[in-house]
Amino acid sequence: MSMDDLPQVAAIEAQSQRDPWPQQSFQAEVENARVAQPLVAVRKHEIVGYIVPWFIEDEMQVANIAVKEGFRQQGVGRMLLSHVLHLARQQGCRWAYLEVRESNAAARRLYGCLGFVATGLRPRYYGHGAEDAILMKKELVPEQST
């Protein structure tokens, strides 16, 4: 993700999230290369998704992920998350964490398929107290070299 990508990313965010991050939040993530490594997925010169992972010590946290409407259920989110999990392993992370709206069944299925398990609940976390967040984590086993 670069500064030039921010308008498209912010548009996807506004379309995808009930409580969207403002464009300035994505700008801060791009500028904070020490912790954040935001990435975009591009198809035919169009940004179709993004992910904002944070790498801290031996942990990776998915801070934000979204796929543009019209490109959902086509493997974009899986590709982004799988790539970030690969990067996390390369950087020596042992754990990956994320949180997801309780009502987001599609995302919960994706995360479960990639090995994330529910570990807790943040009551009334989203939407000014309107919805719970499910906390999920995944143990990252080092990749085997071939």
Image (tube, helix red, strand yellow):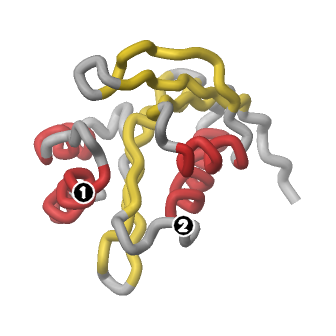
**Dot 2 lies on which element?**
loop
Residue 35 percent location from the top left of the image = 38, 32
Q: Residue at x 31, y 53 (%)?
A: 16
Q: Nearer the viewer, residue 126 or 26?
A: 126
Q: Say left or right for 30 vs 42.
A: left
Q: Is residue 48 above or below residue 141?
A: below
Q: Say left or right for 78 vs 53.
A: right
Q: Quadrant of residue 3?
A: bottom left
Q: Say left or right for 142 vs 70.
A: right
Q: Residue at x 55, y 45 (%)?
A: 105
Question: Which badge, 1 or 2, comes first in the chain's sequence?
Answer: 1
User: Label 1, on which residue?
Assistant: 15
- Residue 61 visible within the image: no
**Dot 1 lies on which element?**
helix
Q: Is residue 101 above or below residue 143?
A: above
User: Label 2, on which residue?
Assistant: 73
